[in-house]
Amino acid sequence: MKVTIDGIEIDVPKGTTILQAARMIGPEVAPPTMCYYSKLKTSGGYCRTCIVKVTQGSTANPNPMPKPVASCRTEVMDGMVVQNITSPEIIEARKGIVEFLLINHPLDCPVCDQAGECKLQDLGYEHGSANTRYEFKRREYEPIDIGDKIKLHMNRCILCYRCVKTAEQITDGRVHGMIHRGDAAEISTYIEQSLSNDFSGNVIDVCPVGALTDKTFRFKQRVWFTKPVDAHRDCKKCSGKARVWLKGEEVLRVTARKDQWDEVEEFICNSCRYDHKKKSDWVIEGPSPIHRNSVISQNHYQHLNELKVEAMKHQKALGFMSINKKP
Amino acid sequence: MGRKLLIHNDKVPGINTLEVYRAHGGYASVEKALKTMTPDQVTDEVKKSGLRGRGGAGFPTGLKWSFLAKPEGVPRYLVCNADESEPGTFKDRYLMEKIPHALIEGMITASYALGAKRSYIYIRGEYFYVARILETAIAEAYAAGLLGQNILGTNFSHDCFVQVGGGAYICGEETALLESLEGKRGNPRIKPPFPAVAGLWGCPTVVNNVETIAAVCPIVNMGGEEYAKIGVGKSTGTKLISASGHLNKPGVYEIELGITVEEFIYSEEYCGGIRNGKKLKAVVAGGSSVPILPTELILKTAKGEPRLMTYESLSDGGFQTGTMLGSGGFIAMDEDTSIVKNLFTFARFYHHESCGQCSPCREGTGWMEKILKKFINGTANESDVDLLWDIQSKIEGKTICPLGEAAAWPVAAAIRHFKHEFIEIAKSKKFVDISHYDRLNKVIA
Amino acid sequence: MGAQVHGTQNFDKAKRSGIKFSEEAMNTVQKIMTNYPEGKSKSALLPVLHIAQAEFGGWLSAETMDYVASVLKIKPIEVFEVASFYTMYNLKPVGKCVLEVCQTSSCWLNGAEDIVKYIEKKLNIKVGETTKDGMFTLKTAECLGSCGTAPMLQCGASYHEKLTYEKVDKLLEDYKTAGKQRNYTDLDYKNTL
C-alpha cells in the first residue's frame, strides 16, 4: 500500500498504521507519541499528540477525513495522503494538546527523577509554548508508594494508560488501574495494595513521565550524570538483557533496553531490575545507543574529558599553551 | 393538528399494560413483519421511510442497519440506547414511562429485521423506575408469546433484556454504552471498528435510540413510503420534541417534521408562548450541545425564510447562523436569562461528564468551566473571552468521541451570538443574574 | 470529585468475611447473570453494584467491592475502576435518603439554585454533607432528564418534579416518617414514595 506522508511516499504492508509508516520514513516526519506503545496491544489514541491530517483517504475514496486522526490508531489505505509537520493546522492543534497535557502538570522538573528522560519535557520543548495561560490551582495528590519499589506521583501523570496495559498484558494479576473519571481520573491501586508481580517493575519503564519512578534510584543521581551501558546476565525469568546505569563502578539503576522510539525492547523481571546492583552481576556489552540530542549523551565525565584533551591538543598544535598536567 | 404516530395514545388509561396497548392496535408491526415479511423487506421499508436516528446524530437508520455485518455462526445484537442524558432531552423517558410496549414492540420488529436473537435496552441508572416499567412490560410480552421461543408461532425467537447504567452521560455515546453494558468503565472506543462490525462482546451490533426503534412500528404498519410522505425533504416522519425552559407549556410533543419553529413555540397546540408575558431571548434547539441561537435567528434563517423544525432548516447557515435538530431537546430562554450563566451550567455539565480518556476533553472542559466561573464571580477579563474561544477550538475535532464537540460548540455559539454579554461582565466586573428570581428570600420575607 | 481523595481505601479483611448478599438479593444477582451469554457475566457488574449498595448500607466499601468481585469472579480492581467511574455509586457512607437536586440548564432556569439553598437552610447542611441524624445527604446532580418538569430532585428511585418550597417541605417530612433507606434496586421498588 502506498501512502504519502508530508510529501514522502512509502510502500507499507496492509494493516500498517499511519504512525508506523511515518516511523519507517524516519524521525523527521514521525509524529510524537505519549500514550502509544508498539509493544502493548490496544495502546494509543488517548493523548492525541500524534494527530495528523488526512487530506486524501485513499485512491478509491479520495475525500479528506473530516477531522484530524490519531495516527497511532488509524490504518493506512492505499493512496492515502497525510500531512503532519507540513500542516500548520496540525502544528497548532498539537500545541493545544501539549498545553492541555501541561495545565495540570506540576512542572516540577527540578525535583523530578524523570528529568532528562521525560517524554513530556521533550514534547513541551519541541511542540509547546514558553508560557502558560492557565491561572488556576493545579490538581494535587500526595505521592504514594505502590509496593516497596515504586513511587507514584499522580501529579505528574498524563493518564496514558501504558502502565495499566503493561500490568494487564505483561503481568498475571493487575492490581492497579484507572479510577474516577474526567480530570479527577487517576492511577491507583485497589485498597492500598502493592504491585508485587515479577514483572511489575516494567510499569516504570513504560511511564513517559515521572509519575512512576524506581524507588531504588530516586534522588540518587541526575540521569545525565550516569552512564548507560547495555549488559546481560543469566536469568531464568526474563531474557536478562538490560540497560545498566553506571556511576563509576556503581550500578545506580537497571532498566529495560529501549529502542530509538524510547520503547522497551524486551521487558525485564524485577530480579534483574532491583536485585542485581553490582557491576559484577552483569556482563557489560558496551555503551547504550542514546540519541545524540538527548541530555544523557551530553554530560558523561569521561566523554567530556576526552573532549577537553582533544581541545587542548588542538590548542597546543596551534601554539596557544602547553599540556603540563592531565586535566 | 399534526399527525402523531408514537405517543398518540399517551393519555389512554392503562396504555402501559399489554392488554390496553394491544386493544389500541399494539404489536401489529410484529404480526405483520414476522408473518408476512422477510427481514430484508423490513429493512427496506425502514430505508424507504427515510427515518433518521432520533438520538441526535440523525444518521439514516436503514443505512445503519445495512452496515451490520452478518458472518455465519456469530450472534448479532440490537442494543437500544435509552441512556438519555443530553440536557434538555426527556422524550425517551416519557415514551418508555407512558407506553413501554411501543419500545418493546419496536425491539422485536427491529431485531427480526436484523436477525438478532438477543437485544438489550441500556437505560440510564437514574431512570430506575422506568427500567422497572419496562421489565414489567417485557414480562407481559413473554407471557403473551411476543418474546421468547417461536414468537407468535413463527420461527423467530428473541430475548430482550433491560440493563441499568450507573450514572454517566458519556454512555449515550454508542461505543461507551457497549463498554458499560460489558461491565466496564464508560470509555468510548477508538473507531474503527464500528459496532456494526465489532460491537457488543465483539459481535456485530446495531445501537439505536429509543424513539428510533419505536418509530419502526408505524413504519412497518403504514409502509416506508407512506411514512416518508410526512415531513419535508430528508426530514421525514414525526419527531418527539422535549420542550423546556421559560415556556408556558413545557413537555414532550410529537410534531410532524416541517412545522415552523414559531408555530412550535407560540401556538396553543404546542408550547403556548413564553411564560409571564416575557419575550424570547434565545433557544437551544436540539439539546445542550447544539449551538444556541438568538430569537431572530431561531425564528428565521439568515436568508429571512421561516425556520422549520427539520434537520435541514435548523442547520441552514451552518454554525455561523444556524444550529441542529440534535436530540430535539428544545430549551427556550426569556429576555431576563443570562446566556453566560446558562453556558456555565453547560460547561459544568460537560466537565462533570468527561470520561477523561483523551487529553483535550479531560483538561479542556474543566478549564472552560473555571474561566466561566470567573464570569459568574465577576472577576473575568476581556481577554478571557478570547481564551475561551481558543480553548474550545482546540478541543473541537481533536477528541476520541463527540463529547469534545458537544462541549466546544455551546461555548463557541454563545460567544458568536452573545459576545457583548461576556464583554459587559468583564468590563463592569459585575455579574448580575436578573433571571434569578430569588424565591427563597421572598418566602422568608 | 476524587482529586482531593486518593483512590486507595482502607480494607478490613475481617469485615469482608462478614459481607454476604441476602437470599433475595443473591437470587436477583444470579438471575441478572443469566441475562448474558456464557462467560460474559462481568456484564452484570453495574446492576450488581446497585444491589450491593442497597444491601450494604447505601455505599460501597472496599470490603463490599471485594465481595462483588468474588461473586462475579473478576479482579477487585475491575470493580473499583467501574464503581468510581459512575456517579450513582457512593464510595463513602451517605444518609438514608440521598437528595440529588438537578442543576443543569432547564432546572437552573427554573430555580434549582433556590431549591438547593432552601434545602441547605432547612436541613442545616451544605451540598455534599449528611445531616447529623444520618437521615439526609444533599447532593447536586447533572441533568436527570426531567427538564420539562423542572426544578426537580431525585431521591432513591423516585423523581420529585416541579418542586416548590411547599413540596420540598412535604417530601422531607414524608421521608423522615418513612425512615426508609432509599436506594436504586428492585428490592426497593415497592417502597418508592
Image (cartoon, coloured by chain):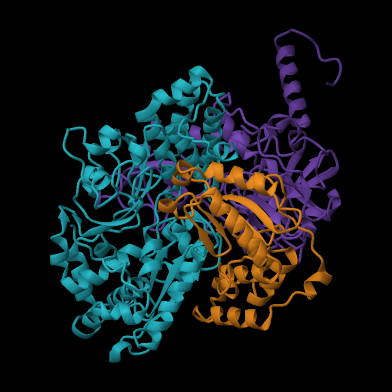
Chain colours: A purple, B cyan, C orange
Direction front: furthest residue: B445
Comparing A11 with A5, the one in front is A5
Answer yes or no: is residue A14 visible. Answer: yes
Depicted B298 relative to depicted A170: above or below: above
Where is A178 relative to A116, above or below?
Answer: below
* Residue placed furthest toward the top: A320
Residue B212 occupies which quadrant of the picture? bottom left
- Residue at the image point whose x is 62% and y is 71% from the top: C51
The answer to whether B405 is drawn above or below residue C66 in the figure is above
Q: Is residue B51 left or right of residue A279?
A: left
Task: Please report the residue visible at 48 percent of the width from the left and 23 percent of the height from the top.
Answer: B425
Which residue is rendered at x = 60% and y = 44% of the image? Answer: C118
Position of residue A188 in the picture relative to residue A76 (left or right): right
Q: How far across and how far down the image is residue C141, in percent? A: 55, 51
For the C terminus of chain A, the image quarter is top right
The answer to whether residue C181 shows anywhere in this view is: no
Q: Is residue A75 above or below residue B431?
A: below
The picture places residue B272, in percent across and down from the top left corner, at: 28, 47
Across and down, in percent, residue A74 comes to 41, 52
Looking at the rendering, which quadrant does residue B394 occupy?
A: top left
Instruction: Between residue A158 and residue A115, name the one nearer to us.
Output: A158
**Residue A129: x %, y % from top left:** 54, 26
